[in-house]
Image (cartoon, rainbow, N blue to C red):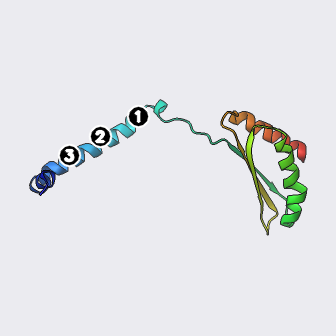
Amino acid sequence: MHWLTRISLYKRWLTLLIVAVIIGGGIYATFHLQQEMIPDIELPMTTVITIYPGASPDVVVDQITKPIEEAIARVGGQKQIRSTSTDASGVGMSVVMVSMSTAPIWGRSMTRSRRNSAS
C-alpha cells in the first residue's frame, strides 16, 4: 500500500484535521480577498433590441435591422455584427462585438447615437 493511503486509513482523525484546515483556509481566503484581486470584467459587446409588434421577421429585417446594422457599421471599431429576428412577436436583436481596444463606454454611446439616427 502507498504510504499516504496507509496513513489516511490508520489515522482518520489526521485526515479529517487536514481537510478541515484546508476548507477553513479556503473560507478565510474567500472573505478576506482584496477587492483589487477581483477584476472588473466587461465584455466588448453591446446589444440593440427592436420591437415592431405584428410584423413578420422579413419586415423587421428589411425596415429595422438592416438600417440599424448599416448605421452601426459606419461607427467603426466593431469586429462583428450579428442580427436575428423572431417569427411571432416582431422582435429583432443585433449584437455588436467591438474590438478590445475600443473603450466600452465609447462603443455603447456611438452605437446608441447611430441607432437613434437610423430610426
The numbered mark, 1 or 2, whose residue comes first in the sequence reads 2
Q: Quadrant of residue 103?
A: top right
Please state which of residues 14 and 75 is positioned toward the viewer in this rendering.
75
In 3D space, how far apart are the residues under numbered discs 1 and 2 (Cα atoms)?
12 Å
- On screen, residue 7 above or below 42: below
The numbered mark, 3 or 1, whose residue comes first in the sequence reads 3
Residue found at the far front of this picture: 1
State which quarter of the image contains the N terminus.
Answer: bottom left
The x and y percentages for residue 104 are 69, 36
Looking at the rendered structure, the kind of residue marked 1 is: Leu
Q: Mark 3 touching mark 2, by CB under 8 A?
A: no
Q: Local crowd at mark 2 within 10 Å, few (<14), some, or many (≥20)?
A: few
SS of the residue under disc 3: helix
Q: Quadrant of residue 77?
A: top right
Please state which of residues 74 and 10 is positioned toward the viewer in this rendering.
74
Instruction: Identify the mark at residue 18; answer none if there is no mark.
Output: 3
In 3D space, how far apart are the residues under numbered discs 3 and 1 (Cα atoms)?
22 Å
The numbered mark, 3 or 2, whose residue comes first in the sequence reads 3
The x and y percentages for residue 34 are 43, 31
Looking at the rendered structure, the kind of residue marked 3 is: Ile
- Determine which residue is flagged by label 1: 33
Q: Local crowd at mark 1 within 10 Å, few (<14), some, or many (≥20)?
A: few
- On screen, residue 37 above or below 16: above
SS of the residue under disc 1: loop
The x and y percentages for residue 105 are 71, 34
Q: Quadrant of residue 51?
A: bottom right
- Determine which residue is flagged by label 2: 25
Residue found at the far bottom of this picture: 88
